[in-house]
Amino acid sequence: MPQSVHDWLVDRLAERKGFSRFAKDNGYEIAKNYTDKKTRHIGNDDDRIWPDVIVFDPKTKGQPAKRIGEVEIEDTVTIDHAKGHWDVYARRVSDFILAVPKSSA
């Protein structure tokens, strides 16, 4: 599956009520990190992580993130990815949403 599908799914996840309405209702903003364009990270300079979707409070410059989301496609649903990304994300933010293909659920 091409990465453009990943980026399309990032947009769709950010538009879901769990992100867009949550952000709007609380005065937060949403940042999206695409395959080839990263716009916002969480963590300090030496400890950055780049989830696909980040809901943040602009008053606190986004630290800490209020909610994050990660989109996986069939090629990226692996044990290494789970240990390298999902575990880290889940430890950083209590409100972490992982979107995977139905066949990988």
Image (cartoon, helix red, strand yellow):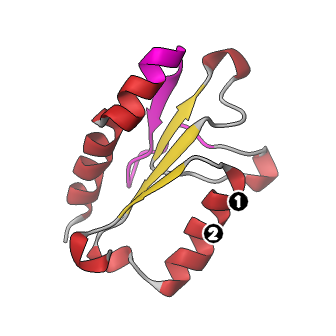
Quadrant position of residue 98: bottom left
User: Label 2: how many residues lie within 10 Å, few (<14), some (14-19) or many (20+)?
Assistant: few
- Residue 52 is situated, as x and y percent measured from the top left of the image, at 45, 49
Q: Is residue 16 magenta?
A: no
Are the two marked residues, 1 and 2, in contact with CB atoms closer than 8 angstroms? yes
Query: As displayed, is residue 76 above or below residue 96?
Result: below
**Residue highlighted by disc 2:** 87
For the residue labelled by badge 1, is the local secondary structure a helix, a strand or a loop? helix
Residue extending furthest toward the bottom: 79
Residue type at mark 1 is: Arg
| Residue at (50% x, 23% y) in the render | 29
| Residue at (46% x, 16% y) in the render | 25
Bounds of the magenta segment:
23-41
Label placed on residue 91 = 1
Residue type at mark 2 is: Asp
| Residue at (30% x, 37% y) in the render | 16
Query: As displayed, is residue 27 above or below residue 98?
Result: above
Most foreground residue, 33 or 78: 78
